[in-house]
Amino acid sequence: MTEADAEFAEQWRLVNTPLGEEWSGRTRYAAAMWFHKRGDMDAETLEVYRICSRLDSTDPLPIIRDRGVGLEWLRRMEAQR
């Protein structure tokens, strides 16, 4: 596994941090920023992660769906689960 692959795997693990864990919202948001910087996530989707960053038990995916943003991100998340 290359260093880039390892970093991607780590960020993917972080963006999927289980709900309800202490600081999990902030962890997911930090990973979401990494994906946004890579061009894998649009600004509207990142904004949902920002809003949820202080809400450790709130799943950002239903909010993303409700807002009708991040369709490619949602496909990617659903494919990996």
Image (cartoon, grey):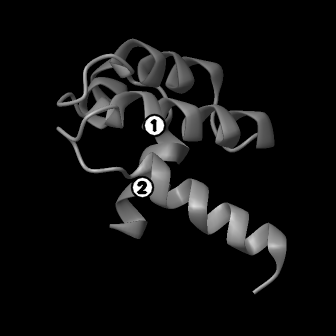
Residue 42 appears left or right of 67: right
Looking at the figure, which quarter contains the N terminus? bottom right
Around disc 1, counting alpha carbons within 10 Å, would you say few (fewer than 14), some (14 to 19), or many (20 or more)? many
Looking at the figure, which quarter contains the C terminus? bottom left
Residue 70 appears at what percent x and percent y? 50, 33
Residue 48 appears left or right of 21: right
Amino acid type at image mark 1? Thr
In the foreground, 40 or 4: 4
Identify which residue is drawn at 25% across, 28% down. Answer: 56
- The image shows residue 13, relative to residue 35, as above or below, that is below
Q: Which mark is residue 77?
A: 2
Identify residue for label 1. Answer: 27
Identify which residue is drawn at 58% across, 62% down. Answer: 10
Residue 58 appears at what percent x and percent y? 21, 28
Amino acid type at image mark 2? Met
Identify which residue is drawn at 47% across, 51% down. Answer: 14
Around disc 2, counting alpha carbons within 10 Å, would you say few (fewer than 14), some (14 to 19), or many (20 or more)? some
Quarter holding residue 3:
bottom right
- The image shows residue 74, relative to residue 8, as above or below, that is above
Element assignment for label 1 = helix
Residue 21 appears at what percent x and percent y? 22, 41
Residue 80 appears left or right of 38: left
Residue reaching furthest to the bottom: 1
Quarter holding residue 4:
bottom right
Quarter holding residue 2:
bottom right
Q: Which mark is residue 14?
A: none
Distance from the alpha carbon under mark 1 to that under mark 2 = 16 Å
Residue 63 appears at what percent x and percent y? 28, 24
Foreground mark, 1 or 2, reads: 1
